[in-house]
Amino acid sequence: MTKRRQSRANRILSRLNGRSIVLLGMMGCGKSAIGKMVARKLGLEFKDADTEIEAAAGRTVADIFAEYGEEEFRRLEERVIERILSEGPVLLALGGGAFMAQPTRAVISRHGLSVWIKADLDLLMERVGRRPNKRPLLKQGDPREILSKLLQVREPVYAKAELHIQSQSGTKSEMRNVVLEALDEHLKDPS
Ligand code: S3P
């Protein structure tokens, strides 16, 4: 780690002042992959909301949707996110629908800095196409049409996030640096 990077990480951490970083955005925007790398640089624990939901339910997300339906998944999602954020500072990657719930947005604004990883439809399609069975919502019809409709409904809500970062089609480590730079800039002392 270079000295400059080290001090950037320290600066970000001290200005977060115990808050968590919460990454949100559409499925396929890279929240988990980028989140892990940013967390490693900052020395923050990384949590993935879907993984935590699966651990709590003892089932995969796809099985929860199939056995109990989306509504029950959303209830579980809200509870799990609230628990994770009340337990202490982490870097949390949300599932794509989580930020749509007002109580979840309230919990996030109490405990963390919300960061929207924006990505356009083509980039999302390219990424979700790699693991089609992971996402139950995309199995309900034509994935491109579904993603496009979800984008229209969700983008105005995602826009309530404190920080917006455009996902780029470079390497993961380039994107990690873009996120670190944006966090540093956003958290800069205004004076
Ligand atoms: C969902 C996104 C998924 C997962 C579930 C629902 C959504 O997470 O939570 O399949 O509503 O967009 P990822 O965004 O991590 O794929």
Image (cartoon, helix red, strand yellow):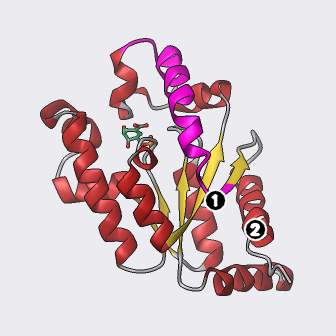
| Residue positioned 61% across, 27% down in the render | 126
Q: Which residues are magenta?
A: 141-163
- Mark 1 residue element: loop
- Mark 2 residue element: helix
| Residue positioned 45% across, 57% down in the render | 105
* Residue 45 tag number: none
Name the one closer to the observer, 146 or 50.
146
Residue 42: give x, y in percent of width and height.
63, 77
Q: Quadrant of the C terminus?
A: bottom right
Tag 2 near tag 1, CB within 8 Å:
yes
Residue 121: give x, y in percent of width and height.
63, 26
Residue 2 lies in what quarter of the image?
bottom right
Dot 1 beta carbon under 8 Å from ligand 1 = no
- Reading the image, the residue beneath label 1 is 162
Examine the rendered structure and indicate whether residue 7 appears above or below residue 105: below
Q: Quadrant of ligand 1?
A: top left
Does residue 1 appear anywhere in the picture?
A: no
Residue 54: give x, y in percent of width and height.
26, 52
Examine the rendered structure and indicate whether residue 29 appears above or below residue 21: above
Q: Quadrant of the N terminus?
A: bottom right
* Residue 156 included in the magenta stretch of the image: yes
Residue kind at label 1, given as amino acid type: Glu
* Residue 186 tag number: 2
Residue kind at label 2, given as amino acid type: His
